[in-house]
Amino acid sequence: MGRVLDHIDAQLDGDLGTETLAAVAAFSRFHFHRQFAELFGISVHRYVQLARLKRASLALAYRTDPVLDIALDSGFGGPEAFARAFRQRIGQSPSAFRAGPDWAPWTAALAPLEQARSQHMTPTYTDADVRIVDFPATPVALIEHRGDPMAIGDTIRRFIAWRRANGLPPARSATFNILHNDPDSVPSEEHRLDIACAAGRVAPNHDGVTEGLIPAGRCAVVRLTGPGDDLRAPAHFLYADWLPRSGEELRDFPMFAERVKFFPDVPANEAVTEIYLPLN
């Protein structure tokens, strides 16, 4: 079934009917849909629809592609079918979501998809997956998100708009998250995360973007290939498993991540995130 989920991620604009997916799984087409639903707790039709809607909604929120192109790229036959499915599941029209996403119903609508993924796609690591690197001092432009993690989408939108206005797309400027605390361990109002990109001087602005620095130093690094929404598994491995065995000591700077390739620019199963743990 892992091959099926990877195939869905890679072919969201293609034929994802039951017969096609059953062939990918090498299961009988007469039984595949029931096997999928029993394993993942969601029908294959709904899983595919939610995966397509997630890709489309992130493109609406964070990209400038026309709505028609987003609909077709997400496997919908046309804008009408796309708008119906989007409104039914997300609770807003595509144009309304682009103008101002309502993230709470969006999160609730996609919860079955995320639950299915978390149950069966959580990455595992061994010590062999860890690299020790000398990270260079990296000046960054950053925007701080403080508060409910569910509202981070609005902070991302502001930062993307600033990057566009200043000619710093991800292809030219590396993208980072600085993880000041664990969202599961602090009240939501105390959650803090910085969204950053490699940059020089930051001109005064009204977007809340300021200058920062990721300092030079040794780091332990693990690579997450696949959806990068949830970094708990690699973070837990580094702190709870690798660090006690390594004999290393932590440096006084937060864990951070580089978004090397990210969804929806690449299929979810091809996204790449490097997680850095600063060491003395």
Image (spheres, rainbow, N blue to C red):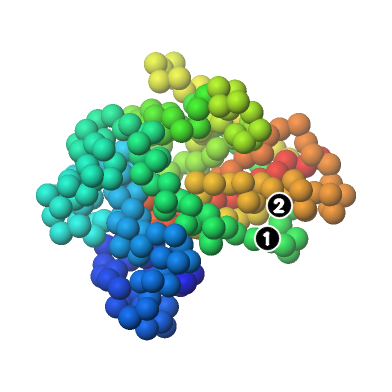
Pointer 1 local density, CA inside 10 Å: few below 14, some 14–19, many at least 20: some
**According to the image, label 1 marks what residue?**
125
- Residue 244 x %, y %: 84, 49
Corner quadrant of residue 107:
top left
Against 235, residue 61 (above or below) is above
**According to the image, label 2 marks what residue?**
237
- Residue 12 x %, y %: 31, 62
- Residue 172 x %, y %: 43, 44
Dot placed on the residue nearer the N-terminal end, 2 or 1: 1
* Of 96 and 160, the residue lying toward us: 96
* Of 211 and 10, the residue lying toward us: 10
Corner quadrant of residue 59:
top left
Pointer 2 local density, CA inside 10 Å: few below 14, some 14–19, many at least 20: some
Q: Secondary structure at mark 1?
A: loop
Rendered residue at 54%/58% (across/down): 119
Q: Is there CB contact under 8 Å for labels 2 and 1? A: yes
Q: Amino acid at mark 2?
A: Phe
